[in-house]
Image (cartoon, grey):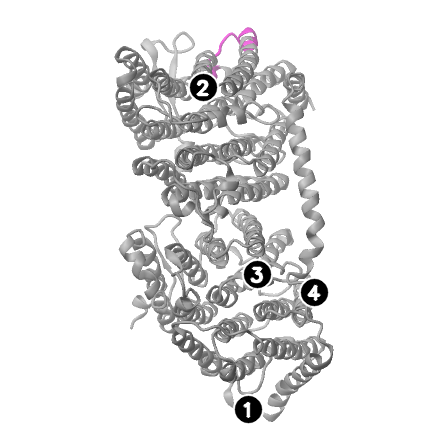
């Protein structure tokens, strides 16, 4: 294929889901859609494989003239995310055994998927924003599938976070576009001089806050355990795997990587490592496997933030691809672990080994167990940490991950099984994603020039990756055996500290009501007329 | 100073004569045919306004017409610049939608029992609808402060009875309160206009713009006129008449009142500040106006969060959304200076247009919901999306625009205002815009979230909902969305035919 044709790959990737969404107005199409959901992301997988590094394509005939391109960072996340969307979509019927999820679920699934895939390819600020909104807001309807109090509360908190995060980002984007009136709307042009101008500190702060909320940087993380706990398994899988990476790609695209960001870099490293350990510590007190996985995501995203912070401190060649590589592995792995939770719910006790062993392999892979895909991901991600204390913290966080994942597997073994129909669909999904998460990093390692397979097989490298896993797993076994403090910290941890705020808010609301009543009194109303005239007239005299 | 008359000037006259003719004809034919007559008139009005719009767009200049061939200050000038043309377009679309939506017999549910149809009410509604269109068009076209005063009174005369259409004691009380506020507002405006005439001997806007001199007298005049108009626009803290009035009227009337009527007086404030005294008031005065807008956004938002009734929630949201309009003033004449005032004005007018479509759609959707389930208590609307999917979709799209979610019209408006805040360095208005968006998200999702609930038994429908009326509501919501898809074209339209002097000079 020539590059002319490859340019159109981003559109091909999105065409099928968008067409499905539009044709969804016909009831007949709507009835078919749930059965083909798994098929719709496949063009995006193809686009990720073949369309990388083609020229950007601009759709001049559309409003806002969106521009799309697939760069190396985007490719990794696009391909893995699309694969996860397909696999999770295939497993949906298993989780809605009694009644099908309904056309509303399908429509919102499609909307979220379009946003999730589009955000990796959007090259201009408006299409990025629109994709980002799509990957955040419609997911609410996927998360809240029942009206119980906890679900509604989790949904409301998710929505609040999504709205606040978007508000911060919109402000950041406005600042970006208004500082240079002549530049176009391409992200790469807008962020070109971001690091050099000291006036841009506010913009960078808004960007880090906004995207930090999406990737659940501590202390902006507590929506994540609440949300993943109540969401249905396929939804939790795509949210934790694919949707969260919208925040990662946002940081990669918008932060200035040319250096000189010492303060912000240190901040990200500090906050990131804090989150990496915080997630582990709170996670091991949880009993629900889904909540544990959510805290593992908090921890992993913290690690990723620390990695990006190192990149801000000292400009590193290829930091974007390294981070995307690590994140892409997390897409497959976290998706796979959530499907494992789903599978454990429908598998008999005597066959649980068939789930627990691969799940353990995946989980310890996340900590860098040699020969797994996670080992390669850690191998790639270790360079930016150098040799000093950041490297030590990174290694310790691997031990923490091993600890948390061992705890996860031990809780997984306790899940009550109930029979389900169509279980084969889930088993196929699970098998595919396990294989992918183990193999894909190996396949891509040399292809992307991030390192050599031979180099990874060095004895020292293997040992350096193995001992944290052994340490973490060992501590975990001891912890489970002797000191388990299950339920010590409620899911959503610091949310409990915010409860007094709701009383303050309610009091404020009452004050406003009283104020409205006061203003409604006729003498007050007449007086306000005159006072306003005086105020306006006087203010001009100053 | 005055442009001579331009081609197509007669269209401006048509846009005034048509609704008046419709009004008179409806009176002749009586209640039974009033609907047909007025609907045809609204369709014709849309065509005429379309002609004006395309005329302004193609020539890139304002369309002018001198009544009787007399040029100002002796004669009366009608002038359609980009602002007028755009607002006339919105008025034509929303009023036609309201006409199509209003049920044939104009029945509405009484508090108990079956819906009641009364020919008197039906007749009055169509009569008032034509009157509002005529009055709004005059507000957008008139170029002297006296004609504008007449237009403003016409708007109030048509708006107040709209509130009291059902005749129940509560709505009468609300209408009376509205009337008194409108009256005080008119007196304040008139006082200012008389003083201006006394000082400068003319009421023509473009002549005044060349004559006015900064000074305490002018500030007092401006303060009187602005406060009077603010009262009619229900700007905080003079907003208190609006919620009972807008929530008590029949849905089609609420839509007209919230979407259009309050914008008339806002439009006059714009004419006053941007055209009569362009750039003269001190920045602190515009900050005061912005502070009132801020109060509206916060107050309206918090109170909307606490309403139990859907229509009251929407009414309080109107108060909040009107607050955004007044942020255009500090952003245009604010501390920074040197910024293109037209951009801030564009943001404010964009908000006025997007809000008109979204709010009209929302009030009408609320009306459909109330008719279908027999009440408008938000707490009992769980699962509504399953029984009224199209209505809820329209409501949802309109809500997204009010919150400012991309790519809706509300988002485009907020983006422009945020940009103005960023460039002029007035970060406090930017914070306010963002906070206002959160509040809007809060009160809108209070309705949308339960409507999406899956495992709740939806309310039972006591009456079927007409698919046609649902489509009208959806079309309005989609208009709010479409506005956001073409922000550049809309912004360009709003800037056509504007006086180049409307910029504040670099200090």
Q: Nearer the viewer, mark 3 or mark 4?
A: 4
Marked residue chain, label 1 = A
Res. A255 mark: 3
Q: Secondary structure at mark 1?
A: loop
Label 2 in the same subunit as label 4: no
Q: Which residues are magenta?
A: B195-207
Q: Marks 2 and 4, how far apart in space?
A: 58 Å
Marked residue chain, label 3 = A
Q: Main secondary structure of the magenta part?
A: helix
Residue B150, position as x, y percentages in the image: 44, 12
Q: Nearer the viewer, mark 2 or mark 3?
A: 2
Q: Marks 3 and 1, how far apart in space?
A: 34 Å
Res. B159 mark: 2
Res. B299 mark: none
Q: Nearer the viewer, mark 1 or mark 2?
A: 2
Residue A272, position as x, y percentages in the image: 65, 67
Q: Marks 4 and 1, how far apart in space?
A: 41 Å
Q: Earlier in the sequence, mark 4 or mark 1?
A: 1
Label 2 in the same subunit as label 3: no
Residue holding disc 1 = A457
Q: Secondary structure at mark 2?
A: helix
């Amino acid at each position: 294929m020539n590059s002319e044709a490859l340019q159109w790959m981003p559109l091909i990737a999105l065409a099928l889901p968008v067409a499905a969404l539009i044709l969804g107005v016909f009831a007949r199409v709507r009835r078919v859609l749930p059965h083909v959901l798994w098929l719709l992301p496949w063009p995006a997988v193809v686009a990720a494989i073949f369309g990388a590094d083609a020229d950007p394509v601009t759709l001049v005939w559309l409003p806002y003239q969106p521009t799309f391109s697939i760069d190396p960072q985007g490719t990794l996340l696009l391909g893995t995310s699309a694969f996860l969307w397909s696999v999770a979509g295939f497993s949906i019927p298993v989780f809605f055994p009694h009644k099908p999820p309904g056309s509303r679920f399908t429509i919102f699934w499609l909307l979220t998927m379009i946003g999730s895939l589009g955000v990796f390819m959007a090259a201009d600020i408006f299409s990025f924003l629109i994709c980002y909104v799509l990957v955040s807001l419609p997911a609410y309807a996927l998360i809240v599938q029942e009206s119980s109090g906890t679900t509604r509360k989790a949904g409301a908190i998710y929505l609040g976070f999504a709205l606040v995060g978007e508000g911060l980002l919109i402000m950041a984007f406005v600042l970006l576009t208004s500082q240079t009136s002549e530049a176009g709307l391409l992200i790469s042009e807008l962020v070109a001089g971001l690091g050099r101008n000291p006036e841009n500190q506010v913009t960078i702060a808004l960007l880090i806050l906004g995207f930090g909320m999406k990737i659940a940087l501590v202390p902006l993380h507590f929506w994540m355990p609440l949300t993943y706990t109540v969401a249905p398994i396929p939804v939790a899988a795509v949210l934790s795997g694919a949707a969260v990476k919208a925040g990662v790609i946002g940081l990669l695209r918008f932060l200035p990587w040319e250096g000189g960001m010492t303060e912000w870099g240190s901040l990200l490293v500090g906050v990131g490592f804090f989150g990496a350990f915080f997630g582990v510590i709170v996670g091991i007190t949880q009993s629900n496997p889904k909540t544990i996985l959510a805290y593992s995501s908090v921890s992993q995203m913290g690690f990723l933030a620390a990695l990006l912070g190192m990149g801000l401190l000292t400009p590193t060649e290829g930091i974007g691809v390294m981070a995307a590589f690590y994140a892409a592995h997390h897409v497959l792995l976290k998706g796979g672990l959530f499907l494992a939770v789903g599978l454990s719910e429908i598998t008999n006790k005597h066959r649980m080994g068939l789930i627990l062993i691969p799940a353990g392999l995946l989980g310890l892979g996340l900590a860098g167990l040699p020969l797994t895909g996670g080992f390669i991901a850690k191998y790639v991600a270790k360079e930016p940490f150098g040799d000093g204390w950041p490297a030590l913290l990174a290694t310790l966080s691997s031990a923490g991950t091993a600890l948390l994942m061992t705890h996860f597997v031990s809780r997984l073994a306790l899940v009550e099984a109930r029979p389900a129909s169509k279980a084969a669909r889930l088993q196929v999904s699970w098998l595919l994603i396990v294989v992918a998460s183990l193999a894909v990093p190996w396949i891509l390692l040399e292809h992307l020039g991030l390192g050599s397979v031979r180099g990874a097989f060095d004895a020292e490298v293997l040992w350096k990756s193995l001992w944290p896993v052994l340490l973490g797993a060992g501590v975990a076994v001891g912890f489970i055996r002797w000191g388990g403090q299950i339920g010590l910290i409620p899911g959503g941890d610091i949310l409990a500290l915010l409860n007094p705020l709701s009383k303050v808010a309610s009091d404020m609301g009452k004050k406003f009501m009283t104020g409205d009543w006061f203003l409604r009194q006729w003498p007050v109303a007449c007086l306000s007329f005159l006072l306003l005239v005086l105020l306006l007239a006087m203010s001009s005299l100053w | 100073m005055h442009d001579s008359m331009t081609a197509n000037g007669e269209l401006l006259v048509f846009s005034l004569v048509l609704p008046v003719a419709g009004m008179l004809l409806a009176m002749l034919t009586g209640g039974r045919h009033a609907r047909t007559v007025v609907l045809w008139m609204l369709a014709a009005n849309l065509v005429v306004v379309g002609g004006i719009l395309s005329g302004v767009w193609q020539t890139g200049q304002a369309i002018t017409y001198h009544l009787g061939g007399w040029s100002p200050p002796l004669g009366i000038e009608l002038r359609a610049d980009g602002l007028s043309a755009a607002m006339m377009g919105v008025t034509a679309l929303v009023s036609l939608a309201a006409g199509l939506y209003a049920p044939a017999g104009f029945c509405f549910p009484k508090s108990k029992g079956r819906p009641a149809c009364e020919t008197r009410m039906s007749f009055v509604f169509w009569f008032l609808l034509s009157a509002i269109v005529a009055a709004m068009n005059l507000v957008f076209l008139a170029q002297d402060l006296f004609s504008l005063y007449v237009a403003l009174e016409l708007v109030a005369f048509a708006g107040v009875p709209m509130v009291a259409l059902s005749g129940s004691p509560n709505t009468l009380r609300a209408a009376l309160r509205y009337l008194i506020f409108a009256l005080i507002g008119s007196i304040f405006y008139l006082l200012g206009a008389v003083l201006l005439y006394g000082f400068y001997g003319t009421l023509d806007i473009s002549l005044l713009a060349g004559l006015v001199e900064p000074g305490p007298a002018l500030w007092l005049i401006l303060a009187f006129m602005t406060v009077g108009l603010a009262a009619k626009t229900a700007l905080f803290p003079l907003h208190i008449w609006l919620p009972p009035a807008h929530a008590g009227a029949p849905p089609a009337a609420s839509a007209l009142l919230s979407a259009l009527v309050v914008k008339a007086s806002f439009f006059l404030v714009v004419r006053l500040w941007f055209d009569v005294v362009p750039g003269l008031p001190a920045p602190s005065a515009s900050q005061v106006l912005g502070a009132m807008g801020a109060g509206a956004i916060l107050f309206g938002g918090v109170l909307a969060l606490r309403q139990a009734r859907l229509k009251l929630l929407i009414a309080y949201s109107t108060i909040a959304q009107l607050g955004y309009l007044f942020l255009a003033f500090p952003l245009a004449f604010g501390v920074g200076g040197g910024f293109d005032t037209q951009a801030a004005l564009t943001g404010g007018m964009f908000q006025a247009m997007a809000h008109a479509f979204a709010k009209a759609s929302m009030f009408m959707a609320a009306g459909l919901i109330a008719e279908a389930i027999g009440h408008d208590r938000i707490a009992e609307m769980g699962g509504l999306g399953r029984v009224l999917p199209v209505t809820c979709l329209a409501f949802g799209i309109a809500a997204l625009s009010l919150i400012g979610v991309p790519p809706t019209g509300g988002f485009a408006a907020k983006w422009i205002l945020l940009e103005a805040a960023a460039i002029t360095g007035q970060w406090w208005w930017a914070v306010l815009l963002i906070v206002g968006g959160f509040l809007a998200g809060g009160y809108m999702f209070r309705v949308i979230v339960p409507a999406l609930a899956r495992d709740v038994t939806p309310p039972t429908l006591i009456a079927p909902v007409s698919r046609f009326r649902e489509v009208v509501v959806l079309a309005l919501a989609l208009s709010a969305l479409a506005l956001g898809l073409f922000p550049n074209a809309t912004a360009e339209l709003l800037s056509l035919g504007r006086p180049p002097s409307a910029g504040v000079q670099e200090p």
